């Protein structure tokens, strides 16, 4: 990923992680996703007033929180002034484990440096197979379809902005007709944009004398990996054949929904 592309995507948010623009991506038909219409990010709880004002001025009008109830209770969103908060929990608890303490992670991951990687593959399988997750992602599209005014931004996020948010972006970009290679590139971009946050967390663990196994596993939890996405796509193939069919069969979107989505989010 070039610096130019990274800079184009990443927003200048200083008190949060993984805030980025989905505008500008080109569809197979040659249209582009509009800028100032949809953002993806990590949690909003750490945001300072400067960053909240930036997001408000950027046009954020819907804040979609994909986190579980325990994550929201620990770190409730700071919502931009003119935005409406929408709570859509993909899971009933934090399966991604981004909100767990070091002690909890040490107990689970000691002695198996690959457990975190395998755990994340299970999470991605569940995001596709779980009926509740399907219902939530359908509701996510309902919110996207409700945001028809130009310059009004839908921001969607979880805790790290990479897994539940990552699959939401995969579904959204697929629905708009973005090619699979570009979708995968955007998915993996987390590892570049969130690199300072990931490095800081791993360095913090080292100063706390976390075990090598725990650090290896937490790196897997904090990052994205092609294996994770491949696991989701494998389940999609098993259920529906491909992502486009899954949007209809799994997420219950109609052809009319997809047509309207493209009218709202794509350039003419």
Image: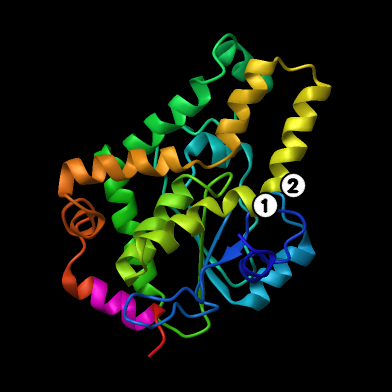
Secondary structure at numbered mark 1: loop
Give the extent of the magenta segment.
258-264
Question: In the rendered image of this protein, does residue 106 appear above or below residue 161?
Answer: above
Count numbered badges in the picture: 2
> Percent from the top left, x then y, of residue 74?
62, 36
Res. 86 in view: no
> Percent from the top left, x then y, of residue 173?
38, 65
Q: How is the image coloured?
A: rainbow
Q: Residues within 10 Å of mark 2 (few under 14, many from 20)?
A: few
Q: CA distance from mark 2 to mark 1?
A: 9 Å
Disc 2, disc 1: CB below 8 Å?
yes
Residue at image x 55%, y 42%? 72
Q: Residues within 10 Å of mark 1 (few under 14, many from 20)?
A: many
Secondary structure at numbered mark 2: helix
Left of 167 or right of it: where is 113?
Answer: right
> Percent from the top left, x then y, of residue 140?
37, 59
> Percent from the top left, x then y, of residue 136?
33, 50
On residue 17, the disc is 1
Q: Which residue is mark 2?
A: 196
């Amino acid at each position: 990923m070039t610096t130019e592309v990274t800079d184009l995507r990443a927003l200048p948010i200083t008190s949060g992680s993984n805030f980025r623009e989905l505008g500008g991506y080109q569809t197979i038909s040659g249209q582009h996703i509009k800028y100032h219409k949809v953002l993806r990010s990590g949690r909003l709880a750490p945001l300072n007033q400067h960053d909240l004002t930036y997001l408000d001025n950027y046009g954020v009008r819907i804040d979609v929180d994909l986190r579980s109830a325990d994550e929201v209770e620990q770190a409730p969103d700071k919502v931009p002034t003119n935005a409406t908060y929408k709570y859509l929990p993909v899971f009933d608890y934090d399966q991604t484990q981004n909100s767990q303490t070091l002690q909890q992670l040490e107990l689970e991951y000691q002695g198996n440096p690959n457990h975190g990687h395998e755990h994340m593959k299970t999470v991605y399988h569940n995001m596709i197979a779980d009926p509740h997750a399907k219902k939530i992602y359908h509701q996510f599209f309902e919110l996207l379809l409700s945001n028809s005014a130009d310059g009004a931004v839908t921001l969607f996020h979880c805790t790290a902005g990479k897994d539940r948010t990552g699959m939401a972006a995969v579904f959204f970009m697929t629905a708009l007709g973005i090619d699979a290679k570009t979708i995968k590139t955007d998915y993996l971009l987390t590892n570049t944009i969130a690199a300072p946050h990931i490095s800081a967390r791993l360095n913090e663990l080292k100063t706390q004398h976390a075990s090598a196994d725990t650090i290896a596993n937490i790196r897997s939890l904090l990052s994205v990996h092609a294996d994770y996405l491949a696991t989701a796509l494998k389940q999609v193939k098993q259920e529906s054949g491909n992502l486009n069919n899954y949007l209809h069969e799994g997420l219950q979107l109609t052809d009319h929904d997809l047509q309207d989505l493209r009218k709202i989010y794509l350039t003419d």
